[in-house]
Image (cartoon, grey):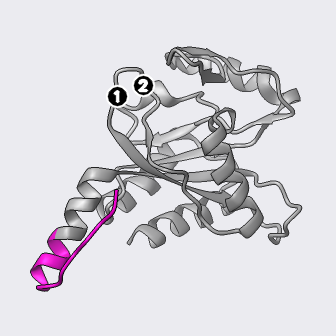
């Protein structure tokens, strides 16, 4: 169900080039209900020349950050460093209580960026090691899967994604589900963490 949820949202965003928060919510919400995914998000590519307009739209919409941000070494939000492009969170479902992530540039984080580049090169979803959520007081690691959206263009190794679909799965519940499934099937399960 995870693969289908990600692929379904990928296809939707490839066709519906400009989607608003309500359209995203209506499409993503049933995918979350039908899978093990806790959060689905969309991160569009925002080129340097588009940053000011993107940030003005965030501020006008009343999002907490109101700008494209990164997380510094202390765990605080700060404006994202200047770059050729960014991949900030634009839509997320459910929005509450995850609105704090709107504007976060996932490409500003080294581990996330490596997974995103891997996904772009292969055309397949990729995940960094489990990471904490983008909030200072979170100590729970999550599995974050990045899947590139290439629009109607055919994927090539040189193509830059128009954006990424992001699926967030909390690691602990996923492991509990795997163990329970194997236990029900009387299979021996060993995991190395």
What secondary structure is found at the residue carrying circle 2? Answer: loop
Which residue is pictured at 34% across the width and 28% down the height?
138
Res. 175 image quadrant = bottom left
Q: Are marks 1 and 2 in contact (CB under 8 Å)?
A: yes
Dot 1, how many residues are within 10 Å of its Cα: few (below 14), some (14-19), or many (20+)?
Answer: few
Picture residue at 33% right of the left edge, 52% below the top:
171
Residue closer to the observer: 173 or 183: 183
Q: Left or right of 62: which side holds 190?
A: left
- Tell me where residue 136 appears, x and y as whole percent: 41, 20
Q: Does residue 157 show up?
A: yes
Rendering coords of residue 144 (x, y %):
48, 50
Q: Residue at x 44, y 54 (%)?
A: 28
Q: Which mark is residue 156?
A: none
For label 2, the residue is 135
Bounds of the magenta span?
180-193
Q: Is residue 189 magenta?
A: yes
- Position of 95 with respect to 176 (left or right) is right
Q: Is residue 150 visible?
A: no
Seen in the picture, residue 66 relative to 54 is either above or below; the reply is above
* Left or right: where 153 falls relative to 92: right
Q: Position of residue 129 (x, y in %)?
A: 50, 50
Of residues 179 and 61, which is closer to you in this image?
A: 179
Secondary structure under tag 1 reads loop
Residue to which mark 1 is pinned = 138
Q: Disc 1 and disc 2: Cα gap in Å?
A: 6 Å
Q: Is residue 41 above or below residue 10?
A: above
Q: Quadrant of residue 158?
A: bottom right
Q: Nearer the viewer, residue 113 or 64?
A: 113
Residue 83 within the segment the image draws in magenta: no
In the picture, the quarter occupied by the N terminus is: bottom left
* Residue at left offset 33%, top offset 64%: 35
């Amino acid at each position: 169900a995870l693969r289908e949820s990600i692929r379904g949202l990928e296809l939707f965003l490839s066709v519906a080039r400009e989607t608003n928060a309500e359209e995203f919510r209506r499409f993503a919400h049933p995918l979350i209900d039908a899978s093990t995914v806790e959060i689905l998000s969309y991160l569009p590519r925002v080129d340097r020349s588009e940053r000011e307009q993107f940030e003005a739209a965030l501020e006008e919409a009343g999002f907490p950050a109101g700008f494209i941000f990164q997380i510094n070494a202390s765990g605080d939000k700060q404006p994202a460093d200047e770059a050729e492009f960014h991949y900030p969170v634009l839509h997320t479902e459910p929005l509450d209580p995850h609105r704090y992530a709107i504007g976060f540039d996932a490409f500003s984080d080294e581990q996330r960026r490596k997974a995103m580049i891997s996904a772009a090169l292969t055309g397949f979803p990729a995940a960094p090691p489990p990471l904490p959520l983008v909030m200072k007081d979170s100590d729970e690691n999550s599995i974050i899967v990045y899947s590139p959206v290439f629009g109607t263009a055919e994927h090539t190794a040189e193509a830059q994604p128009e954006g990424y679909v992001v699926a967030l799965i909390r690691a602990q519940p996923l492991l509990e589900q795997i163990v329970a499934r194997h236990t029900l099937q009387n299979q021996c399960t060993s995991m190395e963490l």
